Image: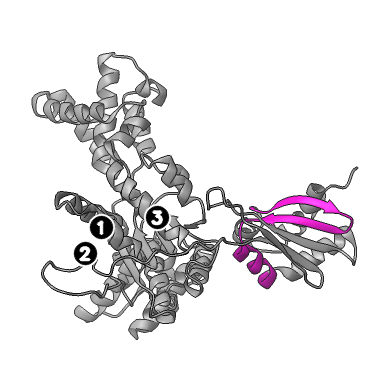
Amino acid sequence: MEITAQSVWNNCLAFIKDNIQPQAYKTWFEPIKAVKLSGNALSIQVPSKFFYEWLEEHYVKILKVALTKELGEDAKLVYVIKMENTYGNKQPFTEKIPSSNRSAVKSQDVDVPFDNKSPELKNPFVIPGIRNVKIESQLNPSYNFENFLEGDSNRLARNAGIAVANKPGGTSFNPLLIFGGVGLGKTHLAHAIGVDIKDKYPEKTVLYISAEKFTQQYIDSVKKNNRNDFIHFYQIIDVLIIDDVQFLSGKTGTQDVFFHIFNHLHQNGKQVVLTSDKAPVDMQDIEQRLLSRFKWGLSAELQTPDFETRVSILRNKLYRDGVEMPEDIVEYVAKHIKSNVRELEGAIISLIAQSSFNKKEITINLAKDIVEKFVRNTKREVSIDYIQKVVSDYFQMDVSTLQSKTRKRHIVQARQLAMFFAKKYTKASLASIGSQIGQRDHATVLHACKTVDNLSSTDKQFRKYVEDLSKKLSL
């Protein structure tokens, strides 16, 4: 059998996989590609300089053992750092860095001069009539890296955040997009990055803002005919942190202005940090030119924390609040609340409150009562796919039938109900709902919602459909 770069690397991966945690393997080794084999030197491609540095710091020993088994004592590993060209036609150059038995090829950034803007720019965060050139960061100092506990579920995102905070605009993580479900710590991590940068680089202008507030400011600037002032204000920011960027979905004007702001910041070596509830590939109604820029840096996912991480989060919370709690109760809460960190901390706060207000001892039974109420009262997230399945099952039809072009009355009504509940239970835009339910447009979804409202008040049987489906979807 011919020895190739891929076959050597596959054998190395098999050995590595048996000797490290599954999540670590998925995060740090699955993205690597074997590039070429030249004698006893294997070249592997990694997504960024940070990736290479992390492997060197944490996995150099296991890499050496694995490679030595395959290529002998003189085995060498060459890192090829593959980055997309982010500067139009300006090609980055490569530079080889020799090492004792390892080397790396890295893409260097091309410096672009920064255009200094007029200091008399209108600040959207300042009340009109009050002179104030200082830009408040809008950061919450209680959100920091110290109380953002590391685990397998967040290791990549947290370490990328630390790398950005150490060298804002100077890493390949620009933009850094942190994505994941509700309550997993996206906002916390975004603030932590900003807080750490302000601590290390007090002279830098850091600004945290939600995409919703950014959109509202843009709308106000258009109304007041000072759109250019709005753009220029954001172009002087050194580190821009935008939370819930998926909120820009369907808002073409805001997307256009953000595109220009993003380009200016990125080309001038300024740092952009974004958070989203979904990966770029899953974002609906965001322009392709923006999505492509979101992918320029690193997209790091925050996943549901495992049991050990949940226990650590609770212990840390109790320690910070100066509260002692029996270990079996901490583990009980961690075992039964799995979905997100916000719920986890909420349950422990409720437990402490119940104990102190009602002068009750913290027992397993009290913990069971709190956890049961908490889990029951927590609204479950419902996806459009799930809604379509529930509606289809209720009317005994396939999802493909529900999405079809047929105009048969009972299928049309089922489709309209799916659209109605998608609008009710998800944050998706009308256009996004329409595209996912049979490639319809937003006007069709709007018409469906009005039809369901009208029929619910005039048709007894139809009202029963709505009530039955509401129960199934809100369980």
Could you say which disc has been placed on residue 150 in the image? none
Location of residue 352 with respect to 308 vertically, above or below: below
The reply to whether residue 426 is visible in this rendering is no
Type of the residue with mark 2:
Lys
According to the picture, the residue beneath numbered tag 2 turns out to be 122
Secondary element at image label 3? helix
Q: Which residue is drawn at 75% across and 50% down?
A: 35
- Percent across and percent down for residue 421 are 26, 36
Secondary element at image label 2? loop
Tell me where residue 439 sits by quadrant: top left
Stretch of the chain drawn in magenta: 31-58
Question: Decide: marks 1, 2 in contact (CB < 8 A)?
Answer: yes
- 352 vs 102, left or right, is left
Q: Which of 397 and 162 is in front in this view?
A: 162
Could you say which disc has been placed on residue 262 in the image? 3
According to the picture, the residue beneath numbered tag 1 turns out to be 230
Tell me where residue 99 sits by quadrant: bottom right
For the residues marked 1 and 3, what is the alpha-carbon distance in whole angstroms? 13 Å
Type of the residue with mark 3:
Phe
Q: Nearer the viewer, residue 421 or 358?
A: 421
